[in-house]
Image (cartoon, rainbow, N blue to C red):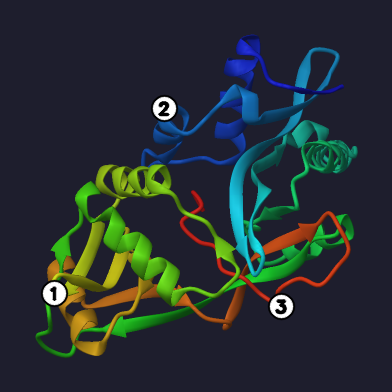
């Protein structure tokens, strides 16, 4: 049976999540406290046992013609005892049907491992969201940033819209507040650089990497390393160097050749 979760499913959902996504950094507790919703959780259940599940998270995608609603498939997992029995295929098929009923334009996801791009291909997903990854190294002093707060959200939003591709995940104020809170609670924080009151670059940082860094110059990179007390740091930015996520369009037609997504609880 495929159905959405109810209150009686909470314990089984958390147990399956922990089994498939073991965590020592506190993210699981944070996710269930701040982002999890039963109404977004689609389950495959047999004889009272939870076999597999996906999160159908609502997002909007900026396109050339405006914005469209999409589903972000997150936390897709199958109990080891029930794998290779078609549970994930049936969950995805139902999610696609629900998307079409609701008029959503596409389904998107970020494979947790490179080999999973091939796993999702038969379901109609194609690599679409790309990033550039590199490592920066301490070479001297630089321009230090300041820690960002909710008051900086208008600056974050403006720089994100200016530096990302025309096709990108839309980010509203609630999204930015959620990311700032997440990186403050579990990461090294979010940092920004300003010139004359205008933000020129920002970086959302974990202890060992900047998951999203936009607009950084070499002096700003050095300032970030100094602020974080790091000699080296992996940095992810906009670009087409490698595929991060996939999309499945629900309607035929001409679509953008690529897009950008990140900071998606990934």
Graded by Cα atoms within 10 Å as few (under 14), some (14 to 19) or many (20 or more), the crowding at tag 3 reads few
Residue at horizontal 20 percent and vertical 72 percent from the top:
198
Mark 1: secondary structure = helix
**What residue is shown at x 42% (from left), y 82% (from top)?**
134
Return the residue found at the far top. Answer: 8
Q: Which residue is mark 3?
A: 257
Front position among marks 1 and 3 = 3
Mark drawn on residue 226:
1
- Please tell me which of labels 3 and 2 falls first in the chain: 2
In this rendering, the answer to whether 149 lies above or below 88 is below
Circle 2 residue: 33
| Image spot of residue 133 (x, y percent) | 47, 78
Residue extending farthest to the front is 65
* The quadrant where residue 158 appears: bottom left
Nearer to us: label 2 or label 1: 2
Which of pointers 2 and 1 lies earlier in the amino acid sequence? Answer: 2
Q: CA distance from mark 1 to mark 3?
A: 38 Å
Q: Position of residue 232 (x, y in %)?
A: 27, 78
Q: Secondary structure at mark 2?
A: helix
Inter-mark Cα distance, 2 to 1 = 33 Å
Please tell me which residue is depicted at 29% across the width and 57% down the height of the picture: 154
């Amino acid at each position: 049976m495929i159905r959405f979760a109810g209150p009686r499913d909470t314990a089984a959902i958390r147990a399956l999540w922990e089994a498939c996504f073991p965590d020592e950094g506190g993210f699981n507790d944070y996710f269930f406290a701040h982002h999890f919703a039963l109404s977004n959780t689609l389950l495959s259940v047999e004889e009272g046992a939870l076999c597999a599940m996906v999160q159908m998270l609502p997002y909007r995608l900026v396109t050339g013609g405006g914005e469209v609603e999409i589903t972000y498939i997150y936390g897709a997992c199958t109990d080891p005892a029930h794998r290779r029995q078609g549970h994930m295929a049936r969950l995805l098929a139902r999610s696609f049907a629900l998307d079409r009923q609701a008029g959503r334009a596409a389904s998107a996801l970020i494979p947790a491992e490179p080999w999973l791009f091939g796993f999702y291909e038969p379901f109609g997903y194609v690599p679409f969201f790309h990033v550039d990854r590199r490592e920066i190294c301490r070479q001297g002093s630089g321009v230090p940033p300041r820690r960002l707060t909710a008051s900086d959200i208008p600056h974050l939003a403006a720089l994100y819209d200016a530096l990302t591709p025309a096709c990108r995940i839309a980010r509203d104020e609630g999204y930015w507040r959620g990311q700032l809170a997440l990186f403050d609670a579990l990461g090294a924080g979010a940092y920004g650089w300003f010139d004359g009151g205008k933000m020129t670059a920002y970086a959302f940082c974990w202890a060992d990497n900047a998951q999203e860094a936009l607009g950084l110059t070499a002096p700003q990179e050095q300032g970030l390393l100094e602020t974080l007390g790091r000699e080296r740091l992996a940095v992810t930015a906009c670009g087409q160097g490698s595929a991060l996520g996939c999309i499945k369009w629900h309607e035929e037609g001409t679509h953008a050749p690529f897009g950008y997504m990140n900071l998606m609880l990934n």
